[in-house]
Image (cartoon, grey):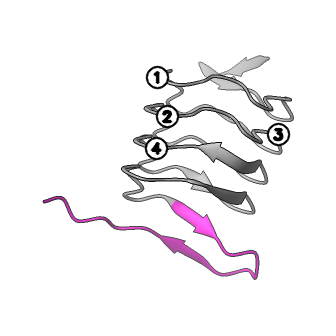
Amino acid sequence: MNTHRNRIDLSGAELRGADLSRLSLVGVQIRDADLTGADLTNCDLRSAELNDSDMTDSDMRNADLRGAWLVGAYMSNKLGGADLDGATIDDGSGGFWVIACEKE
């Protein structure tokens, strides 16, 4: 684990099945990591960089992903209640979306 400018870098980490629920990982870099089956419920991932990570079957219910980057990330997971406002999600074809969610 490296830090640069007070940012945690978990790039390339093997986090398969890890329990990261309720952790504050604001601004963390988790590029090209294996998060398969990880528990990220209620995790604070604001402005996190999850580019090129495998999040197959991870549980991200109620996670805070505002402003997160998910470019090239593989996702087939639970997102119920997750806040994706301002998140950037790449579809793999060179196009990308910035998600805007209205609050009730």
Q: Under tag 1, what secondary structure?
A: loop
Instruction: Kindly report the distance in space between the C-alpha atoms of the residues bearing marks 2 and 4.
Output: 5 Å
Instruction: Kindly report the distance in space between the C-alpha atoms of the residues bearing marks 4 and 3.
Output: 18 Å
Q: Which of marks 2 and 1 is nearer the N terminus?
A: 1
Give yes or no for residue 100 being in the magenta stretch: yes
Where residue 64 appears, x then y in whole percent? 41, 41
Q: Which of marks 4 and 1 is nearer the N terminus?
A: 1
Q: Under tag 2, what secondary structure?
A: loop
Q: Are marks 2 and 4 in contact (CB under 8 Å)?
A: yes
Q: Do the residues labelled 2 and 1 touch (CB within 8 Å)?
A: yes
Q: Earlier in the sequence, mark 4 or mark 3?
A: 3
Q: What stretch is highlighted in magenta?
A: 88-104
The three-letter amino acid code for the residue at tag 2 is Thr
Relative to 66, residue 9 above or below: above
Q: Mark 2 points at which residue?
A: 41
Residue, x 78% and y 29% (percent of image)? 15
Q: Which of marks 3 and 2 is nearer the N terminus?
A: 3
Residue, x 53% and y 25% (percent of image)? 21
Q: Under tag 3, what secondary structure?
A: loop
The three-letter amino acid code for the residue at tag 3 is Asp
Q: Name the residue under label 4.
A: 61
Q: Under tag 4, what secondary structure?
A: loop
Where residue 73 appears, x then y in whole percent? 73, 57
Left or right: 70, with 42 as reference point: right
Instruction: Kindly report the distance in space between the C-alpha atoms of the residues bearing marks 3 and 2.
Output: 17 Å
Q: Name the residue under label 3.
A: 34
